[in-house]
Image: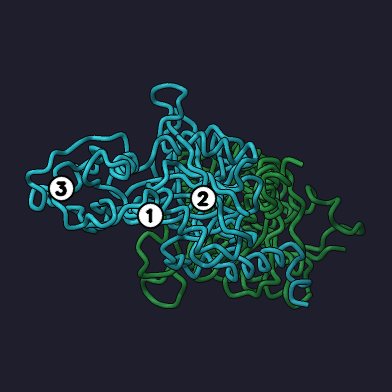
Chain colours: A cyan, B green
């Protein structure tokens, strides 16, 4: 049984991501009764469960298409040792359902509970459909669902997955005012080699550039550009060492096993104050990596053969 | 005996370069009666002597600090096969002497012969010291010296080396109006591996970039910049394929055996339409190559070791 720690409580989007990953990557897991999902109270707690051996994997939110990166996760990754790596990612559309106790889907709703952020994202729908209901704030959408299950409120605005977690039923689905928000979760393992390249891969790393060196960020970007590697994400974040000290979180659209990525990593290691490699893993969206003709593995191999001929002197090379 | 073809006639700066190289690199040559210097009528003829096996090396002018590159040499190198490489360079200060027949240093000079370019570079001196002498143009400074030896004129403005070549003596030395002009000569061999790195090396190559690709020249320069390689020379020259078709002659201050240079060559091979490698060889001025801390061989080796640890997974890497 693969034990997966995740940012709880049960019924959140993170649990949804966890279950989806377990199903999609099921073939990679030991067979048995299925993944044992362990909700943890915080991102550091989920990472600690992984490190201590209480869990085989951990699933934590990484970034949201509306709100940006999740600082608690970035911080936890920076603080954890080199043994923890990202081995996969899961995209979950942020959706909300109106959850009620079974058999009460057609009953009037006088009280509706949720997290304030969820209320904010479903305001239009609530104003139109439940104009008279009293809105009660709870600490999480999952806590709101649990309160409904306990009979304290009539309904909860929560993640669809909370229905199953708390024995509720959806009186309405897709009630977010704005469609299409997506949260990206990462799957962490300890002591694991990178999953094999798939042709649709991502490498996550952090580079610390030398301060007081004009052009250092441009040099950093050139390390990727000269090797034909697209970056899908570049975010500066404080290092925590003081104001003005930044590191760069980078998602590069290539896999550690590709020559272009190896050469770029060598370049970063040479030129940056520090580099942390957090893993190469398949993209959840399956979008094929763009590999310019000048950056493919075959091109690298041919160029290397050519350079090696230069050593031997022209006469030998011809023979 | 090493047979060296050079751009003649005897007594030119090229012969001076040839003899200097033979003396300076004497240890590299088979011992015997010394180099047999063969004057050739043109640069292509000197290269052909090398290719046909009539000569073991060829010395030709490459660039002049006043007049720039020597098109005949660049063209000959582009047309010759991959088996011809630059294995060394010689710098010769362009100096002029007033040469006369022995014993006539104090005789009046009524006629002075030289190449028109040499007259132009010694005009002030001639106007001041030989205001009444008739200036006779010849096809080369060496031809002028020969004519003096044959008694046809009283004096020649020629390279100092022409004195020995034609049995003349210098009535005056260092008569150029402008001091410090230098010509750089290159030594070519056929089928030779690059001489070992010395820490003061140069690599000469030609890159043909993709036309109609905005930013292609910048990409070319980045291939060197990201590897910490200085360029001491960059010159665009027509390819001969049509107007607007250019190639770039590059002197890079690094040696083929350095990891930074190998990686840059791989990058050029990947991204350029064509690359020609003309050799890595010691700089004549002995100036030490600038190797930034991030581009040294040790730094490359350490970075490569680091990247290789990423493959194995963190647990293995720690062990």
Hey, which residue is sitting farthest top in the picture? A242
- Verify CB contact (< 8 Å) between mark 3 and mark 1: no
Q: CA distance from mark 3 to mark 1?
A: 20 Å
User: x and y percent of residue B14 in the render?
Assistant: 65, 57
Q: Look at mark 3 in the image and give the residue it sits on.
A: A109
User: x and y percent of residue A234 in the render?
Assistant: 40, 46
- Sequence-first disc among 2 and 1: 1
In terms of image quadrants, where is residue B167? bottom right
- Name the element at disc 3: loop
Vertical placement of B77 versus A66: above or below?
Answer: below
Q: Which mark is residue A187?
A: 2
Residue at x 59% of width, y 67% of height: A297
- Name the element at disc 2: strand
**Quick one: B247 or A194, which is closer to the camera?**
A194
- Name the element at disc 1: helix
**Quick one: A269 or B55, which is closer to the camera?**
A269
- Quadrant (top left/top right/bottom left/bottom right) for the N terminus of chain A: bottom right
Residue at x 13% of width, y 39% of height: A134
Vertical placement of B146 versus B294: above or below?
Answer: below
How many numbered marks have been drawn onto this rendered protein structure?
3
Q: Look at mark 1 in the image and give the residue it sits on.
A: A164
Q: CA distance from mark 2 to mark 1?
A: 22 Å
Vertical placement of A18 versus B38: above or below?
Answer: above
């Amino acid at each position: 049984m693969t034990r997966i720690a995740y940012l709880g409580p049960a019924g959140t989007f993170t649990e949804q991501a966890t279950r989806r990953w377990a199903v999609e990557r099921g073939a990679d897991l030991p067979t048995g009764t299925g993944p044992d999902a362990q909700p943890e109270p915080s991102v550091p707690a989920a990472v600690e469960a992984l490190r201590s051996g209480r869990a085989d994997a951990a699933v934590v939110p990484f970034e949201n298409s509306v709100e940006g990166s999740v600082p608690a996760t970035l911080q936890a990754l920076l603080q954890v040792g080199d043994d923890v790596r990202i081995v996969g990612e899961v995209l979950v559309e942020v959706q909300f359902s109106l959850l009620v106790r079974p058999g009460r889907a057609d009953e009037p709703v006088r009280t509706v509970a949720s997290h304030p952020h969820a209320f904010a994202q479903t305001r239009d729908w609530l104003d139109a459909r439940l104009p008279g209901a009293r809105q009660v704030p709870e600490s999480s959408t999952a806590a709101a669902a649990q309160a409904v299950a306990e009979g304290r409120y009539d309904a909860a605005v929560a993640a669809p997955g909370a229905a199953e977690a708390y024995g509720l039923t959806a009186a309405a689905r897709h009630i977010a005012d704005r469609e299409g928000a997506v949260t990206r979760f990462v799957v962490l393992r300890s002591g694991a080699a990178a999953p094999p390249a798939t042709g649709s891969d991502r490498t996550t790393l952090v580079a610390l550039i030398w301060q007081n060196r004009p052009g250092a960020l441009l040099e950093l970007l050139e390390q990727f550009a000269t090797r034909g590697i697209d970056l899908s994400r570049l975010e500066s974040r404080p290092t925590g060492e003081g104001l003005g000290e930044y590191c760069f979180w980078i998602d590069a659209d290539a896999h550690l096993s590709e020559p272009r990525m190896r050469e770029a990593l060598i370049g970063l290691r040479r030129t940056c104050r520090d580099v942390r490699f957090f893993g190469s893993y398949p993209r959840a969206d399956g979008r094929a990596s763009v590999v310019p003709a000048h950056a493919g593995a075959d091109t690298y191999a041919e160029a290397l053969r050519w350079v090696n001929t230069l050593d031997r002197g022209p006469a030998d090379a011809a023979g």
